[in-house]
Amino acid sequence: MGTDGSAEATRAVEWAAKEAELRGAPLRIVSVVELPPRMADRAGFGDIGRVAETIRRGAQRSLDTAARRAAAVAPDTSVDTGLLTGAAAVAVTDRGHDAQLLVVGSRGSGPFTAMVLGSVSRYAAIHAACPVVVIREETTATHRQIVVCIRDASDCDPALRFAFEEAGLRKASLLAVHVSRSPYSFAGPGPDGAPVPPPAVAPLPGAEADATVALTDLLATWRTKYPDVIVEQDFVHGHPGRVLAGYSARADLVVLGRHGVHGAARVTHAVLSHAHGPIATVPSQCGPA
């Protein structure tokens, strides 16, 4: 996981430590030594070296603090740390290429300068080769429920596998949700910033019933594979980003498949921007959990 010493990064460290404990896996915490571009442009050669060393020492202190916090949360988990160099988003994302899971906070400070969504967390959530969990807000409440979004029944096995595995580890129930864009939901902001309604197109007759049957059939196989996981399903009309962000307030984790489709990426960004709890994005080529 990546840390920068911020409060949000500390919450991500705690979440990652508990997750590593559940999985019986080691935890590696990384931070990035990155000279801000504007500072590099204005500083002389000697100044750059001094600034880089100051940033390196700060990153190392953040790592040491994070490691102590992880050890306190999960004392039986093996924890090590590492300093990375380069652009923070790329460095952190690439470091997760062989990980079971990459965990990042939604924003931060320091070497992850202005880590608002759209920077490190957004890049990792879209591009990492492994599943990524973005930690949003406080995560201390336990709901005993995992929510997984089903967009395309023909391309959701990695997300379902990850969601069922998480539910099994946490002894939580699983809620599979299919969201259909409502003809009454807003399409987005217009040039003046006001919401623009979509075309008034009524849902196709029987579409909800057909989707419900397809989802039931899809889940039947997974119920057999994970007989100890209580499974429910839901069909909801509305804007997918808004609906799934709402579910995040009552779930321990919301799982989204990552398909590389522009529209799906917009939904993922919307959920990550407005979620109330941890969000996982799972690549379509993800291996077994």
Image (cartoon, helix red, strand yellow):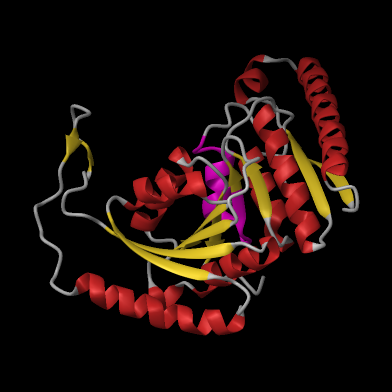
* Residue at figure coordinates x 22%, y 28% from the top left: 193
Residue 209 as seen in the image, left or right of residue 109: left
Residue 279 as seen in the image, left or right of residue 181: right
- Along the line of sight, which residue is nearer the eye, 249 or 255? 249
* Residue at figure coordinates x 19%, y 30% from the top left: 194
How many discs appear? 0
**Relative to 220, residue 262 above or below:** above
The answer to whether residue 2 is seen in the rendering is no
Q: Position of residue 148 (x, y in %)?
A: 48, 62
The quadrant of the rendering that contains the C terminus is bottom right
Residue 78 as seen in the image, left or right of residue 139: right
Q: Position of residue 214 (x, y in %)?
A: 34, 79
- Along the line of sight, which residue is nearer the eye, 53 or 255? 255
- Along the line of sight, which residue is nearer the eye, 194 or 166? 166
Q: Is residue 95 magenta?
A: no
Q: Quadrant of residue 91?
A: top right
* Residue at figure coordinates x 67%, y 53% from the top left: 102
Q: Is residue 131 magenta?
A: yes
* Residue at figure coordinates x 39%, y 78% from the top left: 216
The answer to whether residue 215 is seen in the rendering is yes
Q: Position of residue 162 (x, y in %)?
A: 60, 67
- Along the line of sight, which residue is nearer the eye, 25 or 80? 25
Q: What stretch of residues is rendered in magenta?
A: 117-133
**Relative to 177, residue 1 above or below:** above
Q: Quadrant of residue 114?
A: top right
Q: Position of residue 217 (x, y in %)?
A: 40, 83
**Relative to 7, residue 159 above or below:** below
